[in-house]
Image: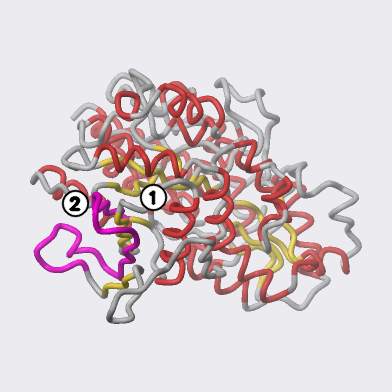
Amino acid sequence: MSEKDSQGGRDESTSATGVGRRTFLQSIGAGGAAGALAGCSSMLGGDSGATLEWAAVYNEDETREAIADALYEAGLSDDIELNIVGLPDANEGIQARYDQWITSGESKPDLLTVDNGWTIPFIIREQLVNLDELLDDSTVSTVKDDYFQSSVNTAQHPDTRDLYGVPLYPEPPTMQYRKDLAMEAGYDPDGENWATEPMTWQEFSQVAADVHEQSDVDYAYITQGAADENMSCCEFPEYFHSFGGAYFGGMDNLFGPVGDRPITVDEEPVIDSLRMARAMLHGSDAPETLDGYEKVMPQETLSWDVVQTQQLFESGDGAFTRQWMFGIPPAVEAFGAENVGIMPMPYAVEEGEGEYDGIGGSSPALGGWHVAMNPNSENEDAAIEFFEAMMQESFLLEQFSVYGVMPPHRDIFYSDAAADVEPTGQYVDAIGASLENAVPRPVTAVWQQESQRISQQARAAHQVDNDPAEEMDELVGLLEEIENS
């Protein structure tokens, strides 16, 4: 992602030693909780107020510096010293460290950046501060009313709907493609509104196969198929939600109640979605596949993760790829903005035509992060200032500029100012079309256990020698055991 320094107009006065108020540290120090964090930290602010420590997703010094500047410009008091600590990349490791710090009473970091995919278990365990009680009513209302609802839902208590995190940014995957290759093959992506009108999976497979055949790239469609979290949270449900299927029935059951909701992965829409994936992987002549779908995925798909697929697409090896937003800037850098197109994920049945309410149509998974507060923090007043600053338009646009992630506030997301941010702003309409229909993963206290089983069974169902219905029958039993334990 593009990194830049934004000093703004703040006074960067220096001390007698010639060192500015901005200080970079290689680590926090072994004595504090944040000493276990990987990467560096950036400290800004005066010496007379609180020291606010934020465990954040920014791992570059330059980015943390620009983000800190943007928060002060957005209203964070200069009396507050802000220490931004870069999180390690291992998502599961972050959860374990947060849990350890909170349960052991550590007061630092004050602010925690939490994945939307595992915020709710922390909420249920009462490990985060209730922001309905901390922030004023207008601030809470802004989040609940004006931010993207699918993102906000993952930061609320599933029963009380109280808010425990402020979305930092939402992130849907999209279908990224070589627009130049599509046009050379005779297609008109702009005229056919590919950016905002999703194709059916069948049409997509036919288009991808045709573009591949008329080009010199190695692969028609590059996507992830490894048995990891991306399969259970995202790739697999993107298939079956678009067919009208679900893990646990309707959307009302996404976040529980555990043990008291139907398990529906053995129903026909889910099985059909696997048959569709098998056709695109093995060809429609293979057993347990759907007719009318072209073979567009190589066998290597079942071992690829998000990093490998990004590298393959950037290297010019494919015509289409399913990828998260972080893949857009490097693709634009590799091929030029005029040669990179973005479209929503394809679908099988129209939205509303699935068996369950809210299921069907283009159904990308929901990614993204929130900022929550450590209940052991001793800096409530400073944290309130922080939350108010991070919700300002100037901060959200600056974060978009330096880190490439979209604003969570709908009006700011669709603003002319956001559209002007290069290189991702030009794709606002396509990303918005995906984000409006994004579906969160079914996060509960048992999701991590369920996720591992789902990934294994879903990947097995893709393999040509296995029967997808049998794999899903087995998965029902595994999920029942976890749900009822």
Which residue corresponds to mark 1? Answer: 455
Question: Circle 1: is it few (<14), some (14-19), or many (20+) Cα within 10 Å?
Answer: many
Q: Vertically, is 446 above or below 32?
A: above
- Residue 158 locus on image (x, y percent): 35, 24
Amino acid carrying mark 1 in the image: Ser
Q: Secondary structure at mark 1?
A: helix
Q: Residue at x 56, y 32 (%)?
A: 269
Q: Residue at x 68, y 32 (%)?
A: 349
Residue that extends furthest to the front in the rendered view of this protein: 16
Which residue corresponds to mark 2? Answer: 108
Magenta stretch encompasses residue 48: yes
- Residue 188 locus on image (x, y percent): 89, 56
Amino acid carrying mark 2 in the image: Lys
Q: Which residues are magenta?
A: 28-55
**CB under 8 Å between discs 2 and 1:** no
Q: Is residue 456 left or right of residue 350?
A: left
For the residues labelled 2 and 1, the Cα–Cα distance comes to: 34 Å
Viewer-proximal residue, 33 or 328?
Answer: 33
Q: Is residue 347 left or right of residue 369?
A: right
Q: Which mark is residue 472?
A: none
- Residue 420 locus on image (x, y percent): 72, 56
Q: Vertically, is 133 above or below 419?
A: above
> Marks 2 and 1: which is nearer the front?
2
